[in-house]
Amino acid sequence: MNRNSGPLGRISDALWRKPSLLIFLLILPPALWLGIIYLGSLFALLAQSFFSIDEFTGQIQYEWTLKTYGELFRPSNFDIIIRTVVMATAVTIGAAIIGFPVAYYAARYARGKWKAVFYLGIMMPLWSSYLVKVYAWKLILAKEGILNWLFETLHLSWLLEAYLSIPIIGGNSLSVSATGTFLVFLYVWLPFMILPIQASLERVPVSMLEASGDLGARPSQTFRHVLLPLALPGVIAGSIFTFSLTLGDYIIPQIVGSSRRFIGQAVYAFQGTAGNIPLAAAFAVVPILLMAVYLWIAKRKGAFDAL
Amino acid sequence: MHSDRAPLGLKIAAGFGLAFMHLPILLIFVYAFTTEDKSYQWPPPGFTLKWFGVTWGRSDVWEALALSLKVASISTVIALVLGTLCAAAVSRTKFFGREVISLLVILPIALPGIITGISLRSAFNLADIPFSFWTIVLGHATFCVVVVYNNAVARFRRVSGSLVEASMDLGANSFQTFRYVIMPNISTALLAGGMLAFALSFDEVIVTTFTAGQQQTLPIWMLEELVRPRERPVTNVVAMVVVLVTFLPILGAYYLTRGTDTVAGQGK
């Protein structure tokens, strides 16, 4: 019996003889989908950032101009960019500090049952609902919530009030302060930092740490001069996520935070109620450019091998 | 000297990190049973099961849930097809534009969601496409492809090429080889990828706010409640149910991909 007869068989033979045809057929649907729907939309958006809006009529003028980009440098708009970048940097540093010990323990010491506990302990928060996580913090930071209750029970309310009276990071209560926004960002993006650090630490051979010890280094020296440089690509890989995610988020500062806006909120407001699509598009270009620079630096530091 | 026991400071720091990641979610479980319905008072004045009944009777919650499940199912199917095709092509051979394709797949998730969202929205506006169920699916499928792709491409690399050649030598055609040799080897990776894609779509809110018209998926419903709270206890219950529901696919994906060090033909 000849199995390779019939139309199916002929198609099969043709695909086997011409692998390039097979590759072409495989790649065509995803390339079309992503190329047309995604890239098409993205370029349509970027193109609109080169248009401008007529200040009197509110109509979009379809003429190429850099005027809209100029508006980004107006103090009120530039503040938004600076604020977002500072927040993203703070969140990234905070996540690295809290995440590193977790990743280090999971990679080096957790064995057997504990390995699974740590794996799921990091994956569960990563994959559980974003909004539920934000909601949990709304509960925690509320005036009548658990954190205020804790400070009161410990008779430390004065400390919290003193902290909240600090300008910029403070506010009327934690849930409407920049500190609150920072805490929620930190909480929501932390797992994205831990995973790449863990991956990079798992690749450090134990013998290297032992050699360092044998050569007379104290544990702190081994950590500083051997482990940390080897873990750095992982930290940078993690920072790509925490930085990028903070740059683009508009929901967290809207729910927990002061009235000072972030880039995401600006994009949302300008395309929505204000109807200023060109300026929204120009604002959207800012995180893209920042991330492009960031990724370029990260690539030079070898962070992509740790992803 | 390096010992195999963790220093105490590290243990405490790691424990603190894990506690920081989990305690807030556990709080949701307490609030679902509180008798307080006007504020987020802690400690809860009392506990009740009443709100589960109230939530059960809310038709808007059910409609949002149904829409979310429908969107997630269809997006997952599209992502499975596109992601697998992409992974098969990229893992098989080196071809021109291979790097571009990988970048293209990752881009929708690498760029902030708001950019994906606003570009899709302005494209729909330009093309005069009215917002509907399908515009939501379009957005979701686009960023779900990467999850399936990542899972599938890792597994494809481990499926030995000699297995495929052996199958062909024994007289099977491409389709039979795919059905009987490749599929069994990649099926768990696809299932895991599909579950994660489902979870991703089920939870997505940023892109959805731009691509949904009047329709509410469950996250959009939840966002409304967060911004303008109407009935807090109902939100508490929904939040708890969402946590429980999303845990299942994660656990499932974990158990499916756990033992994958032993894929057939790996030794070759």
Image (spheres, rainbow, N blue to C red):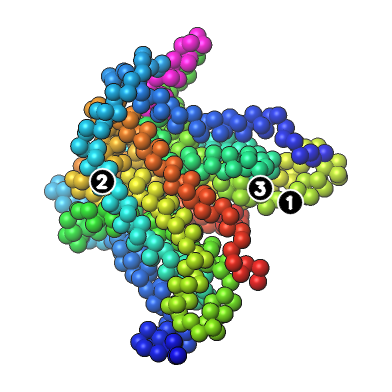
Q: Is B76 colored magenta in this rendering?
A: no
The answer to which of B210 and A74 lies nearer the viewer is: B210
Quadrant housing the C terminus of chain A: bottom right
Provide residue B58's location: percent of width, then percent of height. Answer: 21, 33
Q: Nearer the viewer, mark 2 or mark 1?
A: 2
Which chain is home to disc 3?
A: A
Provide residue A249's location: percent of width, then percent of height. Answer: 38, 42
The residue beneath circle 2 is B66
**Mark 1, secondary structure of its residue:** loop
Span of residues in magenta: A137-155
The residue beneath circle 1 is A205
Q: Residue furthest right?
A: A215
The residue beneath circle 3 is A201
Residue that appears at 30% across and 60% down: A41
Q: Are marks 2 and 1 in contact (CB under 8 Å)?
A: no
Residue that appears at 56% across and 34% down: B18
